[in-house]
Image (spheres, grey):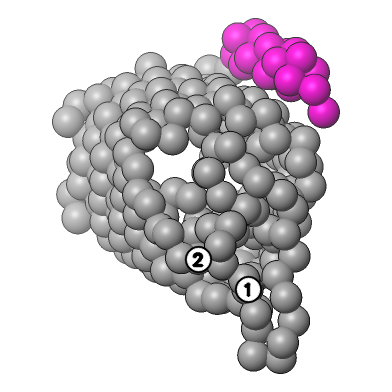
Amino acid sequence: MTQKKIFLLCLAAAMAIGFSYDARAEWEIGARTAFDSNVNRSVNNRDGDFLVTAYAAYSRQPSGETRLDWTLRAIVEGAAYADYSDLNYAATMISPGISIAINPQWNLNISPFAQAKGVSDSDQSAMAYGVRASLKQKWNKALYTGQYYTYTDNNANEDVYSYSENAVGVFVGVKWTPAFFTEVGYEYSHGDSFRTVSTSTVLTTPTGRRGYHRGYSQAYNADVYSETVDRNAISINAGYDFTKSFFTLLGYTYNREKGDFDTLTYHTGFLGLGYRF
């Protein structure tokens, strides 16, 4: 898909956000600074980088008056990297959904989604589609748990960056006060992933099969190939509401990806500020 088409889809989704309105709706703007310890997903030359993201989002939540209701989440965002400027991007996502109140403590939400993403490295520009199903339980005023499943089909301009993925996860959260919460989670996913490797390296598995190279990437200054991986991720998040509108979020995730050729471990973290209105 061309960058022009991606831009038009981003514009259309942004207009959809602008004309959506409901008394139960909530708008949000914010910014985050983040770090990725292996931004180039390298087998033998790992490199970290900082990035800054700004976003505007619209959400419609269930009214709580009926057992069956509809939801909507739409977001427009952009990110800039400190060193890997070729990874700078603009993206928009829209996700309508159905919310089912199974009982006062259990809620099920099923939401298909579509995302358009334009990247400075045009090979990575993509359209993604998928669906997310989440089940959440509220055990008392403080403790909540949840489980989810997400399927993603990402179609990039260059096949090596395209992927399909199935992910399942669980999380446990505690609202210590009306303003402060913490949450821990675990996610397992199975799907395609790209890796980079220096051109002087030959990939060989224990069975003697060679890696599947797809050419040279200017963005990473390395060869890029794709393989199927199993990823395990453990996350810790915390949030604090300074006021009814102004809040902060802090998060850290440990990731481990195992493929035929190697196992990657990397760390991601972020600190963000947001405003709801």
The main secondary structure of the magenta stretch is helix
Q: Is residue 24 on the magenta stretch?
A: no
Amino acid at circle 1: Leu
- Closest to the camera, between mark 1 and mark 2, is 1
Q: Regarding mark 2 in the picture, which secondary structure is present there?
A: loop
For the residue pair 261 and 148, the one nearer the viewer reads as 261
Q: Residue 14, relative to residue 54: is it above or below? A: above
- Quarter holding the N terminus is top right
In the rendered image, the residue lying farthest to the front is 200
- Label 2 neighbour load within 10 Å: few <14, some 14-19, many 20+: some
Q: Image quarter for residue 124? A: top right
Left/right placement of residue 240 relative to residue 237 reads: left
Q: Which residue is mark 1?
A: 203
CA separation, marks 1 and 2?
A: 10 Å
Pointer 1 or 2: first along the chain: 2
Residue 272, x across and y down, in percent:
29, 35
Q: Regarding mark 1 in the picture, which secondary structure is present there?
A: loop
Q: Is residue 209 visible?
A: yes
Q: Residue 205, relative to residue 223: is it above or below? A: below
For the residue pair 141 and 21, the one nearer the viewer reads as 21
Q: Magenta region: which residues?
A: 1-21
Circle on res. 171 = none
Q: Which residue is mark 2?
A: 43
Q: Who's the residue at 58% across and 57% down the image? A: 199
Q: Is residue 147 visible?
A: no
- Quarter holding the C terminus is top left
> Marks 2 and 1: in contact by CB < 8 Å?
yes
- Label 1 neighbour load within 10 Å: few <14, some 14-19, many 20+: some
For the residue pair 22 and 124, the one nearer the viewer reads as 124
Amino acid at circle 2: Val
